[in-house]
Amino acid sequence: MDWGALRLSLALGACTVTVLAPVAILLAAGMAYGRFRGKAALEALLMTPLVLPPTVLGFYLLVAMGPGSPLGRAWTALTGQGLAFSFSGLLLASAILNLPFFVQPLATALAGVEAGYLEAAATLGAGPVSRLFRVALPLAWRGLAAGAVLSFAHTLGEFGVVLMVGGDLPGRTRTASIAVFDQVQALDLQAAGRTSLVLLALAFLLLLGLSLLKRAGQRGPEAPWSF
């Protein structure tokens, strides 16, 4: 059992959710309430990571983070280190990959908030930002929680993009899913089985919590959400 790889996966999942939360809130609000040209194109762009092969997305991200790219040069000038094959690069790739998993349930939940609450807040002088954070988000908190859980769970299981962008560096970019691959390649099936069992248990517990949260939302007074 590679506990270091598991700890790195858990840290990557937690950091991904933390980084994604403010971005997802703004994008989900735009999807739920925005009326602007190009909205359909933006929605399609946000959903693209769901249908692209992980190796394709990983390849483009690797090129974008390379030492010759504007982003790679800027990061090296700022930190003195390369972005590709680093934890920071993994975090950026994970945030992009998991964006639809966070935005979709949250946007659905925000769209389900009863318009009367928002209109009442507007008549009391609340601006758009205040209505979002003081009215809509508290009512749509289950959608926010669902996005966080889905993003965290998906990060734990991601393989293709993580391998393309981060490689397989012990203690730096080797996640639990990559550790399973390495253990199978080394024919250490017992270690692979233990690591896989831990990942399976974590995935089951996260999805069980998500299912219970969804059932509670359907029984409660708040607006339901689905994904």
Image (tube, rainbow, N blue to C red):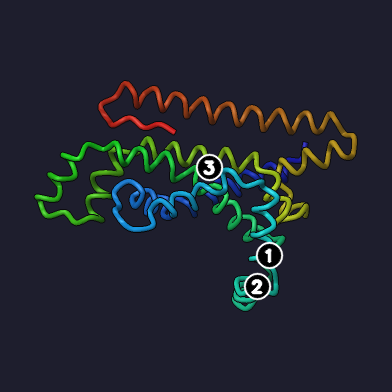
Image point (65%, 66%), residue name: 65
Image point (60%, 43%), residue name: 155
Name the amino acid type tagged 1. Answer: Val
Name the amino acid type tagged 2. Answer: Ser
| Sequence-earlier tag: 2 or 3 | 2
Q: Is residue 217 above or below residue 118?
A: above
Image point (76%, 55%), residue name: 167
Q: Can residue 18 be seen in the rendering of this structure?
A: no
Question: Which is closer to the viewer, label 3 or label 1?
Answer: 1
Question: Which is closer to the viewer, label 2 or label 3?
Answer: 2
Q: Nearer the viewer, residue 157 or 87?
A: 157
The quarter of the rendered structure image containing the C terminus is top left
Residue 188 in the image, given as x and y percentages of width and height: 87, 34
Image point (38%, 48%), residue name: 28
SS for tag 2?
loop
Q: How many marks?
A: 3
Q: Residue 37's quadrant in the figure? A: bottom left
Q: Is residue 35 above or below residue 109?
A: below
Report the Cα–Cα distance between label 2 and label 1. 7 Å
Report which residue position mark 2 lands on. Answer: 69
| Sequence-earlier tag: 2 or 1 | 1
Report which residue position mark 3 lands on. Answer: 151
State left or right for residue 191 relative to residue 159: right
